[in-house]
Amino acid sequence: MNAQHSPASQAETRRARQSFRSKIKERWESPVAGYLFISPWLIGFLVLTLWPMILSAYYSFTDYSLLEAPNWIGTKNYSLIFTNDSLFAQSLKVTLLFVVLSVPLKLISALLVAMLLNKDIKGMSTYRLFIYFPSLIGTSIAVAILWRNMFGADGFINQIIGFFGIQGISWINNPETALSTLVILVVWQFGSSMVIFLAGLKQISRDLYEASSVDGASKLKQFFNITLPMLSPIILFNLVLQTINSFQMFTQAFIITQGGPVNSTYMYALYLYDRAFGRLQMGYASSLAWILLIIIGIATAIIFLSSRYWVFYEHERKGKA
Amino acid sequence: MNLRLSLKNGQWKRHLLLLVSSVVMMYPVFWWVGASLKTNSEMGSPSLFPSVPQWSNYISGWTAIPNYSFTHFYMSTFELVFGVVLLTLVSCSLVAFGFARLDFPLKNIWFALVLVTLMLPSQVTLVPQYVMFNAFGWVDTYLPFWVPSSLGVGVGGSFFIFLLVQFIRGIPRELDESAKIDGCSYFGIYWRIVLPLTKPALVTVGIYAFLWNWDDFFGHLIYINSIDKYTVQLALRLFMDTQSAMEWGQMLAMSLISILPAVIIFLFAQRHFVEGIASTGIKG
């Protein structure tokens, strides 16, 4: 084949050469300066992230207790956790339930409100301010104190339902309802997910909606056929982010319910904290940490694997067209 | 477009829904303000605001913890958090400049690792980090917060590096290119050209670093032991634990004050907030 002389391939080589040249100009080749600039992070990563991870993996096979040097005990921690640790099972169950409840509710609220806000109407910035406000105070103790008060026996929730003649209960002291109060707190703070959705919605071209309106598509149809697919990469991003965060829920459960009543809000991170800093069982806690990492990894992997069925990338569409 | 016109255009439904959402979102905050002015016996009353506001809740709450007033805790927290913010800005901007502008072997691998650590749950490094800092004698000092920040791996570190890299990549290179020809060093380009242009992103990073460290409870809980060094977050928890009969009014008053720095920053820098969050996941 004499492809080299065909005009098409000549153009191709020229283009390749050009892109190569522009690539060189794009960044300066400078190993020493480059490594100097990233050295803070590199040291931080090696000493404060990678090395602790290796150590943590090692500790998880020992009986390390902070007071005494670690002794290698093989997989004993892990076998104890999986066969003879009801608190592990309970905390994992509570955490999974919490993730499965809070993440979808939070994202759905965020998306619906973002769609309401995605229009230039008067007072928009004020609405956005109010709706974002709860996210601002995020994971602070202050909010946890507020929640403890609101959902307590004398709290404002009971006053509202008392208005309808229903006898209130102490929501945070009831094993049936305690977890829900934490879910509500997290869902209430959907603001940051909402802002990300809003930015994504603004990128969707008006033309798509106009064209489908001409074709007579209903608003509902537009939502499912345009908004959701076009937004799906951002839904994926938010979903991964919120899932990872929710698995690590600590502060609110620690302050509002302290894991109770009867361990109904005993989050995984709370259990890990108790083992590590309550009983100083650093080895056991490290095993718990690695199991958490693996669980989060599996959850993230499932989301990413499933994403090929529901996430729609625009360049793919162009490629197929 | 004035309000009446937009209402005519069928926007009233949207306004109504947004109004309802705003009220639902803000109602707990209004309750909070009202309850912080109530007496304990009034706490269960259905009215949002008390008949006689108890401003004394704020005054006696401020000094409710024996031997220390909240002034002390605020000073400590500002010391911790401002140190973290400053160190984070320096370290993350240096690192981001390296990733965005320079080329060196293994760069893509390192940058991928920045993104991986973005997702890494902190529990995995928790125990060995604690053991390490304990061995250095850093427990009950602020060094466990300052040192990681100075290395770009503090709270939110990878996120900030990522955000700044994205931003610096968007700055046109003509300026640095000509500075290079004029014999400017890489550090000179970073310091004199890129850094001034990165200001908006640096403000965003500074705000988030402030808020996240202000709110960070877990880190404070683990590394700070003595009341003398307590942050506001820890002081609030102490306040809650030491009260045999819950002084709800005082506690809500103190917790309300503790979110004021965040609220003030938010009101002054709203634009940076929204842009900061929006720029993270959208590009790329």
Image (spheres, rainbow, N blue to C red):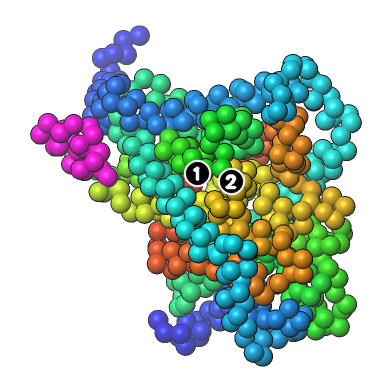
Quadrant the C terminus of chain B occupies: top left
Q: CA distance from mark 1 to mark 2?
A: 8 Å
A130, B122: nearer the viewer: B122
Given contact means CB atoms under 8 Å apart, are the residues at marks 1 and 2 in contact? yes
Is A305 situated above or below B44?
above
Magenta-span inclusion, residue A262: no
Q: Dividing the image into 4 quarters, which one contains the N terminus of chain B?
A: bottom left
Q: Residue at x 77, y 37 (%)?
A: A279
Q: Main secondary structure of the magenta part?
A: helix
Give the residue type at disc 1. Answer: Tyr
Identify the chain of the residue marked 1, using the numbered disc in the image. B
N-term-proximal mark, 1 vs 2: 1
Rendered image quadrant of residue A172: bottom right
Most extreme residue toward the bottom is B51
Question: Mark 2 sits on what residue?
Answer: B224
Q: Is residue B16 visible?
A: no
Q: Residues within 10 Å of mark 1 (few under 14, many from 20)?
A: many
Rendered location of residue B157, percent (x, y):
47, 41
Q: Is residue A171 left or right of residue B75?
A: right
Q: Position of residue A254 (x, y in %)?
A: 72, 52
Q: Residue drawn 27% across and 45% down?
A: B195
Q: Dividing the picture into quarters, in which one does residue B223 lie? A: top right
Callout 2 secondary element: loop
The answer for which chain carries disc 2 is B
State the extent of the magenta-drawn residues as a range: B175-195
For label 1, the residue is B142
- Give the x, y percent position of residue A154: 79, 75
From what the image shows, is residue A8 above or below residue B188?
Answer: above
Please name the amino acid that badge 2 sits on: Ile
Closest to the observer, B176 or A207: B176
